[in-house]
Image (cartoon, helix red, strand yellow):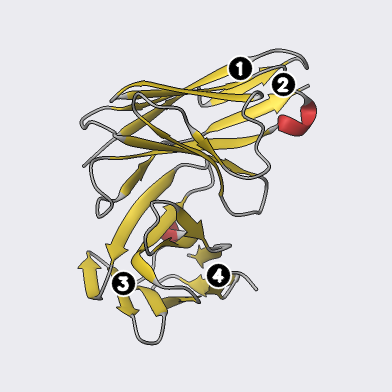
Amino acid sequence: KNEVEQSPQNLTAQEGEFITINCSYSVGISALHWLQQHPGGGIVSLFMLSSGKKKHGRLIATINIQEKHSSLHITASHPRDSAVYICAVRVDGNEKLTFGTGTRLTIIP
Amino acid sequence: GAVVSQHPSWVICKSGTSVKIECRSLDFQATTMFWYRQFPKQSLMLMATSNEGSKATYEQGVEKDKFLINHASLTLSTLTVTSAHPEDSSFYICSAKQGHSNQPQHFGDGTRLSIL
């Protein structure tokens, strides 16, 4: 079993829909990252969380440390949001990131 | 925001060639840089962690003599794939972090390496 599990693996939605991507982890962490990888491969760091909730534009990330679970929400989704979204955790006492397998999001106009 | 520049973005070369990939932090001092490899439809796999001025720490299964990492300054790390073979074809991506552990990692745009 992977230490970081994401769901769903693939998600296709219509433009304007509210999107939720989930991440569960099984280890103690000091921080959780949400990353966005576009088709060209480049990676953008969207959020780094250790508790609570963060919002940036149409993106919202939440984390529940007790339940070892995080969600990434996209409101009013747009085709340009189409990308792979990756959850990564920094395990306690370690600088390295452990990555989920990613969620491939496709937003149809 | 913090920017990490990776060069080249795309390389095609013959088997047996050595290829150098550069990773630069443009507006911050990167005390730690990470090198990852990503095969198609798979997640990123950490290859090694490098701290400025010291030897890189390689992950299990990564050959340090094949993947040479140099982190000679606080803004530059290089990965050299020596005597590359077709099985080394992959997407290589670096990230850089400033200071202590609570800082986020900033990623480069990656290098797509194809060995013929």
Give the residue type at disc 4.
Answer: Glu
Q: Nearer the viewer, mark 3 or mark 4?
A: 4
Q: Give x and y (percent) for residue A94.
A: 40, 56
In the image, residue A89 lies at what x, y percent?
42, 63
Asked if badges 1 and 4 are on one and the same chain, I answer: no
Q: Which mark is residue A61?
A: 3
Callout 1 secondary element: strand
Marks 1/4 in contact by CB < 8 Å: the verdict is no
Using the rendered image, report if marks 4 and 2 lie on a common chain.
Answer: no
Inter-mark Cα distance, 1 to 4: 33 Å
Distance between mark 3 and mark 2 Cα atoms = 40 Å
Q: Is residue B72 visible?
A: yes
Please identify the residue farthest to the bottom as the structure is shown: A67
C-alpha distance separating marks 3 and 1: 39 Å
- Report whether B85 appears left or right of A109: right
Tell me the quadrant of the picture where the C terminus of chain B can be found: top right
For the residue marked with disc 2, what is the amino acid?
Answer: Ala
Q: Are marks 3 and 2 in contact (CB under 8 Å)?
A: no
Pinpoint residue A96: horizontal percent, then vertical percent.
44, 52
Disc 3 residue type? Ala
First along the sequence among labels 3 and 4? 4
Q: Residues within 10 Å of mark 2 (few under 14, many from 20)?
A: many
Provide the residue designation for mark 1. Answer: B19
Tell me whether circle 3 and circle 1 mark residues in contact (CB < 8 Å). Answer: no
Q: In this rendering, which labeled residue sits more in front, label 3 or label 1?
A: 1
Look at mark 4 in the image and give the residue it sits on: A3
Which of the marked residues, 1 or 2, is nearer the chain's N terminus? Answer: 1
Say whether residue B84 is left or right of residue A9.
right
Q: Are marks 3 and 4 in contact (CB under 8 Å)?
A: no
- Parent chain of label 3: A
Q: Are marks 1 and 2 in contact (CB under 8 Å)?
A: yes
Could you say which is closer to the camera, residue A94 or residue A64? Answer: A94
